Structures are given as C-alpha cells and as structure tokens.
Image: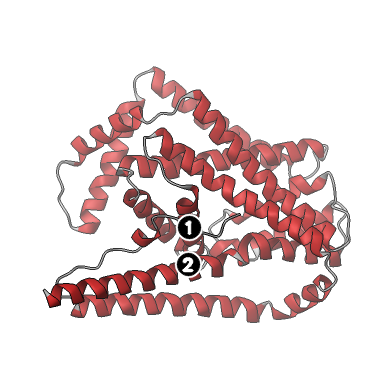
Amino acid sequence: MEHRRPPGYEEDQPRISDGPVGGHHRIRRALRLGLCLGVVALLTFTAVSRWPRLVRAGGLLQGAHLGWVAVAAGAELLSFLTFVAVQRRLLRSGGVGVGLGSLTGVALIGNAISNSIPGGEAWGRIYTFRQFRRRGADPVLAAWTMAAAGFLSGAALLTVTAIGAVLAGGRPGWSGVLGALAAAALSAAGLVVLHRRGRLEPLAVRMIGGLLRAWQRLARRGDGDPRIQAEAAWQRLRGLMPDRRTWAAATALATVSWVADCACLAAAFWSVGAPAPWPGLVLAYGAGQLAGTLPLTVGGIGLVEGSLAVGLMAFGGRRGVTVAAVLLYRLLSFWLLLPIGWCLWAVIARRARRAASAGLQVAGAG
C-alpha cells in the first residue's frame, strides 16, 4: 500500500480570511488549544482510571504471536477502507468522484473527533459534512451520503448479529437482535406505505423545512423560505436515489466492513494463543458493537470492552485470554486510530496556517 499524501488534503481546514484576523484568529487558536487539551485530559483520565486492568492485560499481550497480530491489523484496515468505500460509492452515484485516499483522511479525522470528546459525534458529523462539500458535493448529496452510509452500516451490523444468533442456536442475545430487526422491518414497511399513499413527500418536506428553520434560527441567518428550500431538497434527494446495482455494491461493502472487523477480533484471540469461542463470537461481537452505539460514554469506552468480554466469556472464553484479546482488538480498531486521526488533523492545520501566512505576506508585499 502506497503511503502517499491523499489528494485534496490542503483543503481540509477552513479557509482563513485575508482581512483582519486579530481577535478572530486568537479566538480560533484558543478554541483549538482548548480542544487539544480536552482530548489529552480525557485520554489521560481514561488511562489512569483503567491502569491496573491495562497492566494486567498488557502482561498477557507480551507473548502475542506477531503473525496473528499482523493478520488482525490487516483485517481492521480492510474494515476501515471498505466503510470509506461505501461513502465513495454513494458520492459517485451522485456525480461526485473522490479518491479513496482523500476520503480515508476525512474518515480518520472525523473518527478521532467523534470518539475523543464529549459531543464529538455531532462535531465529527459536521466536519465530515464540510469535507464532502469541499470535495464537490452539494448539501443534499453530502447529507444523503452520510445518512445512507449510516443506514447501510447499521443494517449490515444487524444482519451479521442475526447470523451470529442463528449460529449460536438462539442463545441469550437472540431476543434483542430479533427485536431490532423487527423494528427495522416495521420502519421500512412504514416508509413504503407512506410512499404508496402519497404522504411521504409532504411529511419529508415538513421535516426538512423544520430542520432548516431551526438551523436558520440557531445560525441567525435568513437564507430564504425554508419550505421552498425543503421542496427543492426533496426533489434533489429523489434524483439521488441510486440504482439497484449501487445499493447492492454499497450493502456488500458495508457487510464486508463488519465481517472484517469481527475477523480482527477472532485473530486477536489466536494472537494470544487461545481459540476463538465459536460460534458465539459473532453474536457477542454484534451485541458489543450495538452496545457501543448507546450515547452513554465517549466512543463507547467501557461499554464495548465490557459487553464483548462478558459475552465472549458466556460462550466459553477464558477470563484472562478474553480480556487480552478484547484489549488487542480495541487497540487496533479504536485506540490506534485516534492518534492517527489527530496527528493528521494537526499536520493539515499547520499546513493551512503556513499557506495563510504566505498569502498574507504576498498580499502585504503587493
């Protein structure tokens, strides 16, 4: 894999005005500094509060088989890239072609923002939305891509978890998965009924108009009639509906992403010299991921680890090696991605400041 700098990274930071930047620039620097300090404080608190457990599990990882660790890392890389490929496929269906490298950089930074700070999920989505816009997507396409990718990812996770429940023979966890699948099926059926009765469009326009009106009030901007804009957005959204081939490809990519992530967990077991607790591993994995979606902790810290460990031990995993395998899995799938994303963000921010400084010097010389 080439380690080239993805194209378009120069555009990843907000543009700095050529006008007066005194107070505004100082406020932005203070906000960035506060954000960095908050991230460091959160990570430090997490490490200190869980230090004894980390030390014990870290001792078990000392003899980890490097070959299986490499396999686990490769599986996690495949998982991340296939999820990015889902977004790329949806953007392309809307007429916007973006390189996989560029979108991977956006995803890494957005992931770091979402999983590092309180309320980061919202900020991460805002960042991703702005980056899609800067790469040529209009607001409707950018929002649609994020929503559709999230829907496909959630549906794929439910499917993988349901398969795990079947493999586990309907053991504990099946009722929750069945309920989630039933809720998803009822939601889809409700949308189909509304569409056939001609009520989906008015409802959607009303909802979009309400969101636009709320945004205008929050931003204190009056950029036209929200209802007219909502009707135009709905028509644009109807034009963005992908064909069956695109849906199938995006669904397959989303499913591969979760399967590869689950394979990372299985390889983590093999790396610590323990057999993966089949067939319950898939069900425990899915339940742990679903638990991580609950907005109780930043990035699901503690929820995912605890749910995975408890579920895996319920299916025969030994306590010591299970904790070590879960730790290695989370290290590769979660903790390692955070510094990569923030370092990438810092590099881009520094390049943007240098470019802005050079532009101001040229303007002053002129």
346 up-or-down from 70: above or below: below
> Which residue reaches farthest top?
196
Left/right of residue 345 with respect to residue 207 in the rendered view: right
> Which residue reaches farthest left?
366
314 up-or-down from 340: above or below: above
**Residue ID at (78%, 35%):** 166
Left/right of residue 354 with respect to residue 254 in the rendered view: left
What is the three-letter code of the residue carrying label 2? Answer: Leu
Residue that label 2 marks: 344
What is the three-letter code of the residue carrying label 1? Answer: Gly
Q: Secondary structure at mark 1?
A: helix
Left/right of residue 206 with respect to residue 225 in the rendered view: right
Residue that label 1 marks: 105
Identify the image quadrant of the C terminus: bottom left
> Which of disc 1 and disc 2 is earlier in sequence?
1
113 up-or-down from 51: above or below: above
- In the foreground, 308 or 268: 268
| Residue 66 placement (x, y as % from top left) | 80, 64
Which quadrant of the structure image shows residue 63?
bottom right
**Residue ID at (74%, 49%):** 263
| Residue 364 placement (x, y as % from top left) | 13, 77
- In the foreground, 12 or 162: 12
Q: Which mark is residue 272?
A: none
In 3D space, how far apart are the residues under numbered discs 2 and 1 (Cα atoms)? Answer: 8 Å
